[in-house]
């Protein structure tokens, strides 16, 4: 979606409308305490604080919680174009643990797209910049329009040729 400031403003409004609707319907992301820190077409930055009820038996943040934060960032970033998009494959590595009270930030960005598939990188870090997780996700972009995108999409926005 290119074409100058008018399209950029429309793309940003579309991203905000879609992600706002998704978060309102996403009880799990709300349980995590996810906040949208930044949003742009095909990228999203989420923030959350690790709570005591998110720790595993070793006293560190459960890997599933970190995965879920990264997966939510992927979901929000990959749906900003207004078409329903779902993950089909994900992988994650954990270079360092997170602990109760840590504020985690997950930044998701589209690396490439071809037809109905798009590939995203999500980096999760503590507030001090320490990398907590490196996540890669592949998504399938459907032709189905998000309800929040009604009337905002134009021909060619479907992204899956």
Image: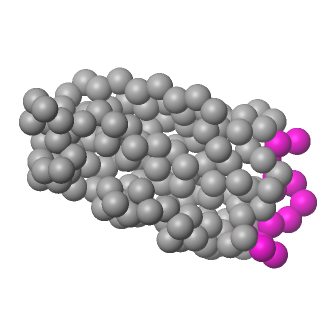
Residue at horizontal 38 percent and vertical 63 percent from the top: 30
> For this view, does 116 lie left or right of residue 155?
left
- Quadrant location of the C terminus in the rendered image: top right
> For this view, does 50 lie left or right of residue 93?
left
Q: Nearer the viewer, residue 96 or 22?
A: 22
Is residue 119 something that shows in the picture?
no
Total marks in image = 0
Residue at horizontal 49 percent and vertical 35 percent from the top: 121
Q: Position of residue 58 (x, y in %)?
A: 10, 30
Q: Nearer the viewer, residue 37 or 4?
A: 37
> For this view, does 146 lie left or right of residue 89?
right
Magenta region, main secondary structure:
loop
Q: Position of residue 160 (x, y in %)?
A: 82, 42
- Quadrant location of the N terminus in the rendered image: bottom right
Q: Which residues are magenta?
A: 149-161
For the rendered model, the colour scheme is one colour
Q: Position of residue 144 (x, y in %)?
A: 80, 56
Magenta-drawn stretch contains 112: no
Q: Is residue 105 above or below residue 89?
A: below
Magenta-drawn stretch contains 155: yes
């Amino acid at each position: 979606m290119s074409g100058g400031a008018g399209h950029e403003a429309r793309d940003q409004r579309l991203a905000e409308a879609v992600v706002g609707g998704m978060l309102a319907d996403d009880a799990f992301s709300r349980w995590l305490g996810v906040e949208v820190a930044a949003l742009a077409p095909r990228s999203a930055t989420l923030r959350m604080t690790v709570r005591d009820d998110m720790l595993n038996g070793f006293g560190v943040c459960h890997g599933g919680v970190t995965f879920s934060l990264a997966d939510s960032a992927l979901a929000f970033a990959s749906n900003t174009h207004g078409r329903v998009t779902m993950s089909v494959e994900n992988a994650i590595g954990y270079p360092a643990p997170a602990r109760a009270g840590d504020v985690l930030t997950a930044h998701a960005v589209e690396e490439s797209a071809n037809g109905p598939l798009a590939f995203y990188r999500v980096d999760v870090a503590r507030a001090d910049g320490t990398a907590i997780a490196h996540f890669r996700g592949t998504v399938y972009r459907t032709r189905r329009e998000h309800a929040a995108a009604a009337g905002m999409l134009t021909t060619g926005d479907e992204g899956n040729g």
